[in-house]
Amino acid sequence: MSGPFAVNRIVAGILDDVAAREAVTSFQSIKHLSRQAPEPRDAAAAILRSGCGVIAEIKRQIPIRGQSIDISSMSEFAASIERAGAHMIACQTEKLRYAGSLEDMREARLAVDLPMMCRDIIVDPYQIHEARYFGADIVPLQVELLGQARLVSLIDRIESLGMTVLAEVRSPEEADRALSAGATVVGVNAWSINSAELDRENFNSIVPGLPPEVLRIALGGVRTAKDLLSYAAAGADAVIVGEAIMSSEDPAAKARSLVAAGQHPACPSR
């Protein structure tokens, strides 16, 4: 799946799914339900815990490998990741590529005390209220896919519900747009949005331009403790790790080893 048209198809598919869900549960209804949900957990505090935190991404499919993951119990899987020491869990809810669901996220959140990130391509306000209703504490926005007015609007809506925004960027220009829109947590994604290209150096090219108070998360390419320590040395407060954990024969053990690296006294941290 490569090229901008692939991204357009993904976004179109997501919007079709949103429209189908809204036909069942109106925007006003999901808006009301989202405001009745339990208080969000403090995602920023989880990121600022000692060392370089591990945000474990749970997903049922790894599209780049064409691999399906057998998760018989999402609650038990999430609990095992929490016991491994992860600072946060990111549940992949996108149906099109990852066979995810909001129900997966709800089940995972009910099983743990960690903050929960809704990993999806969020482009519509309806999705934000859905995410809050189903238990999200932090929501990502792909800056590349959003005009500036829409970016500002979605950030305001996420924060109005008490959640944290993760602004995902892939260039210094996108980072500037995220900061201008009010983002205080920036994730630098090493994966191209429309190809399988990975550029770990992307983090190093963007982070020096971020104000010191902005929280920095590295996404993509963390497979080993060395990868995590490299990002930490470049200024990462946390890393999101999905493929390395989910493709492991023992996901909890893999998460535990990365957490140990991030908590080692030699690991740089703010």
Image (cartoon, helix red, strand yellow):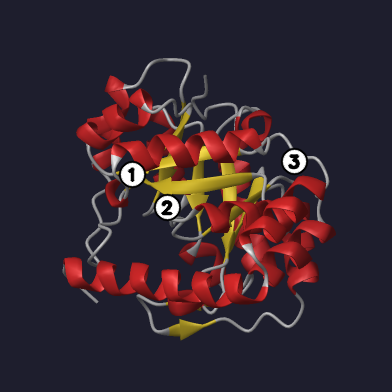
Judging by the rendered image, the residue that carries numbered circle 2 is: 222
Q: Residue at x 42, y 55 (%)?
A: 123
Please name whichever residue, 134 or 19, is drawn nearer the observer in this view of the structure. Answer: 19
Q: Residue at x 79, y 68 (%)?
A: 75
Q: Quick one: label 3, few (<14), some, or many (20+) residues within 10 Å?
A: some
Q: CA distance from mark 3 to mark 2?
A: 28 Å
In the image: residue 14, left or right of residue 136: left
Q: Residue at x 83, y 46 (%)?
A: 38
- Residue farthest along the top direction in this orientation: 212
Q: CA distance from mark 1 to mark 2?
A: 22 Å
Q: Secondary structure at mark 1?
A: helix
Q: Give the residue type that dot 3 points to.
A: Pro
- Quarter of the image for residue 87 reads top right
Judging by the rendered image, the residue that carries numbered circle 1 is: 143
Mark nearer the viewer, 1 or 2: 1
Q: Give the residue type that dot 1 points to.
A: Val
Q: Quick one: label 2, few (<14), some, or many (20+) residues within 10 Å?
A: many
Q: CA distance from mark 1 to mark 3?
A: 23 Å
Mark nearer the viewer, 3 or 2: 3
Judging by the rendered image, the residue that carries numbered circle 3 is: 40
In the image: residue 19, left or right of residue 208: right
Q: Secondary structure at mark 2?
A: loop
Of labels 3 and 2, earlier in sequence is 3
Q: Quick one: label 1, few (<14), some, or many (20+) residues within 10 Å?
A: many
